[in-house]
Amino acid sequence: MAGADGDDSLYPIAVLIDELRNEDVQLRLNSIKKLSTIALALGVERTRTELLPFLTDTIYDEDEVLLALAEQLGNFTMLVGGPEYVHCLLPPLESLATVEETVVRDKAVESLRKISQEHSPVDLEVHFEPLVKRLASGDWFTSRTSACGLFSVCYPRVSSTVKAEIRQHFRTLCSDDTPMVRRAAASKLGEFAKVLELEYVKSDIISLFTALASDEQDSVRLLAVEACVSIATLLPQEDLEALVMPTLRQAAEDKSWRVRYMVADKFSELQTAVGPEITKNDLVPAFQNLLKDCEAEVRAAAANKVKEFCENLPEDGRETIIMTHLLPCVKELVTDTNQHVKSALASVIMGLSTILGKDNTVEHLLPLFLAQLKDECPEVRLNIISNLDCVNEVIGIRQLSQSLLPAIVELAEDAKWRVRLAIIEYMPLLAGQLGVEFFDEKLNSLCMAWLVDHVYAIREAATTNLKKLVEKFGPEWAQNTIVPKVLGMAHDPNYLHRMTTLFCVNSLSEVCGQDITTKHMLPVVLKMAVDQVANVRFNVAKCLQKIGPVLDSNSLQTEVKPVLEKLATDQDMDVKYFALEAISVLVLA
């Protein structure tokens, strides 16, 4: 290759080669990322004849450089002269698809899948399909795992003889000696099945599926469960019972919890794929067993699917199935020993009320919700509170308030401050669900009580809570309900409570607007400037600074400025500091 002083047009490739050979990985990585620029500079002819052979020879590098290369090559079609020359990209990508690092192989396969679409059917058979065969019969498992991801992209566009060869190769890989290869084949089984003709799905895929689903490695078996969803959607209803269900039943009772977990995780999709009849006869008992599984992870995955599973049941027998078969299992899960299981159930159980209707909800579900509201795990309680609206729609606010509200009040007064804190954070949500009249009647006093809690974090959260409530219910509600109570605390003997008034004014001024702030809040704040406690006085200065932008300039000049000037001569250093800061921020000097 000519140096920089020779042919000028060779300069970029010379620099690239220097950088690619550089000891510094970062420099090599940068040059790979600039490949497209260099290919543009070289033109399509020389990219094909010089750059690609050079890259194919240098595939012995750090993984991150190879990863960048595999990604770049996927976007190189136009740089080598368009679809008719796209096969030139296959040699470097083939080498990359056989390296040891999985991430690089996956990226190479992704790029190969991408450029396969740009091959004409003839090129696909002449160039791409032989590459897939070479990978599929490679000595190292790395190349064979990569081949698994390429069958489905070339199968639909080749002749029937080549199709037969591809099916044969896939069959061989499904029974490969190396578990990693079988795992790769299992993960692509569903995708491959989708491009096959129905007769071959029945004759080839089903036997492969059955074999993989009873593989000695659980990591292979669980991937076969994923494929089951795709296969079941492809087959006509009458074939499902004979061809898919025996294997699925076996997977649902597999000795490895990972496989059972996968069945639970994919349960709704399986239910949709197999249809209502099989669901009723087969999946309901299987789902019951998964809800009672000995492994907590499996129970949690199944609990997560309870609502979805019930929604998708055939309507004619839905209520009976839920009440007789599923509800007993759900009741047991409410008192499960594992908190993840209880939490998973709590996040979906409220949705059952819309399926079961008012009477069943009141009789059967409300006791469960109550039990969960009193659970020692905060996540369980919060999952229930955050989904109250769907129960409210079914049974109405009165019924809800009689049953669940006492439990919420109990939590709001819990001895553990973190429990109280969690309930405060849900108050605006509850308020939105329950409406203003109900809120004023039942929950307002709670929100005010939190303002005088002995834990600062609670008082702080209660202040933020008030702001959110005013955003929901509006300034007029605030003026009648909240503001008088907040301002009443300004005369409290405890200075911490007096300070809470100032914190509330800070957060409420913005949402209440100029009128309420100027007429009601400002006079109280100004009076507090002569408080005995320095902490209160400097918080007055901070508060005036915060509410200043809400006030009109007249109030600022005539009322706020004199008070701040007086505080600026206070004996306490902190009071003086914050007063001067407020004067400069509000530009009152």
Image (tube, rainbow, N blue to C red):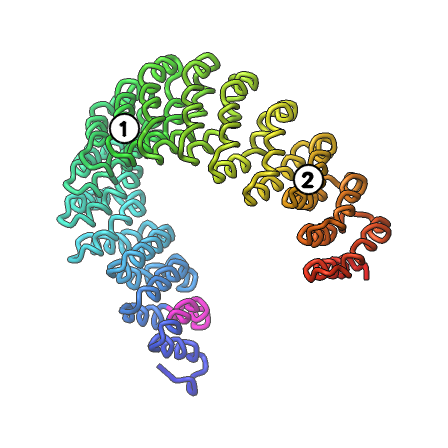
Residue 445 occupies quadrant: top right
Instruction: Find out whether residue 179 is within the magenta segment.
Output: no
Residue lying farthest to the left in this orientation:
177
| Residue that numbered label 1 is attached to | 290
- Judge from the rendering whether residue 309 lies leftward or rightward of residue 261; answer left or right: right
SS at mark 2 in the image: loop
| Residue 491 on image: x %, y % | 72, 40
Residue 79 occupies quadrant: bottom left
| Neighbourhood count class around disc 1 (C-alpha, 10 Å): few under 14, some 14–19, many 20 upward | many
SS at mark 1 in the image: helix
Quick one: quadrant of the C terminus? bottom right
User: Is residue 192 positioned above or below 11 on the image?
Assistant: above
The amino acid type of the residue labelled 2 equals Asp
The amino acid type of the residue labelled 1 equals Leu
| Residue 209 on image: x %, y % | 21, 36
Quick one: quadrant of the N terminus? bottom left
In this rendered view, identify the residue nearer to me: 545 or 113: 545
Number of labels in the image equals: 2
| Residue that numbered label 2 is attached to | 492
- Judge from the rendering whether residue 522 lies leftward or rightward of residue 182; answer left or right: right
User: Is residue 581 positioned above or below 214 on the image?
Assistant: below
Report the span colored magenta. Answer: 29-47
| Neighbourhood count class around disc 2 (C-alpha, 10 Å): few under 14, some 14–19, many 20 upward | few
Say which label, 2 or 1, has the lower sequence index. 1
| Residue 381 on image: x %, y % | 45, 31
**Image point (29%, 69%), residue name:** 61
Q: Residue 121 carries which label?
A: none
Magenta part, dominant SS: helix
| Residue 180 on image: x %, y % | 20, 50
Instruction: Find out whether residue 41 is within the magenta segment.
Output: yes
**Image point (28%, 35%), residue name:** 261
